[in-house]
Image: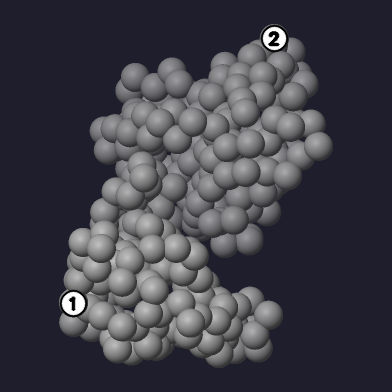
Amino acid sequence: MAKFLNTDLLNEWIPRLIDETERELIIIVPYIKTSNLMYKHLYDANKRGVETTLVYRENKLSPEEKRKFEALDNLNLMHHPNIHAKCYYNEKYMIVGSMNLYEYSEKNNREMGVLLHKVCIDNENGWGNVDDKQIFEDAINEIKIIINSSFSEKQSRETLTDGFEMNIIKTQRELIEDTCKEINKIYLHKKFEPKEIRGEWKSFCNNYYDHIDVSLEGRVVFTFNYSDNRIEDIFKRFIPNYHEFRFDGYKFYWNNAKSPIYLYPNSKHPMWKNISHDDDRKLMKNGIDQVIIFLRPFL
């Protein structure tokens, strides 16, 4: 749920947003004259490995400020002739409001803004729930337009090495496309593609095995492409052999003939401890293949 921010709360939340950034930060403001404290937040984020993209209004940055930003080696500095928007955005939060990255504004102006949550934040006050995804899609689209039409003044070390790419301004479909590319390196001839399922983009493999589709949704979902009567018959023959922990290291559910089959990692099993992202995917592929082999006699 969105939260209204007055000047005091903007002074609290803009530094907090910077401090809680994990990987990527975007700031769009026309006027910049950072206080020592605000610059320290940016400097510390840079030391943590955060890649920051800062877009300001053309000809509105003093030589002194430019020198300060030159010290941030993982900063993309850009300018645009028509910027008047003020936006602060990372993986968890977006602040849209009236406050520039300007010391005078922090101390003297009456400012207003809105804090939006991209992920659910545990909070006893109840305003930390996820905000409408369409708001973020629309905002991301505008941010991309602004960045695309800006002039690059300084590139981050990551941009210099790998080219400019920020995941926080990718749409959900674009992120799933990236995920599918990585998944397909592990699944080889099994090809996953983005598919919209219940309003969300997921990694989906059509016909992973004859008449069985597989989607990856944080869990694995198996869906039959048979008639209802055929699925009912499969379920009746299958259910005497059902056990939630049939597959070592996984949880396995098929509750009724009208529901999909679900496979989860058993987080209490030691094989899931301290593993890499790729190893996680390999283990899930192993689980999927075990389920398919188990189901084959019932098909």
Look at mark 2 in the image and give the residue it sits on: 110
State which tag comes first along the sequence, 1 or 2. 2
The residue lying at 39 percent from left, 74 percent from top is 236
Whether residue 120 is visible to the viewer of this picture, yes or no, is yes
Quadrant (top left/top right/bottom left/bottom right) for the N terminus: top right
State the SS at label 1. loop
- The spot of residue 162 in percent (x, y) is 33, 65
- Towards the viewer: 218 or 101: 218
The residue lying at 18 percent from left, 77 percent from top is 210
In the drawing, does residue 73 fall left or right of residue 83?
right
Whether residue 284 is visible to the viewer of this picture, yes or no, is no
The amino acid beneath tag 2 is Arg
The residue lying at 44 percent from left, 47 percent from top is 168
In the drawing, does residue 38 fall left or right of residue 148?
right
Which of the numbered marks, if any, corresponds to residue 210?
A: 1
- Towards the viewer: 296 or 96: 296
Nearest-to-viewer mark from 1 and 2: 1
In the drawing, does residue 43 fall left or right of residue 246?
right
The residue lying at 40 percent from left, 31 percent from top is 134
- The spot of residue 228 in percent (x, y) is 26, 59
- The spot of residue 219 in percent (x, y) is 47, 66
The amino acid beneath tag 1 is Asp
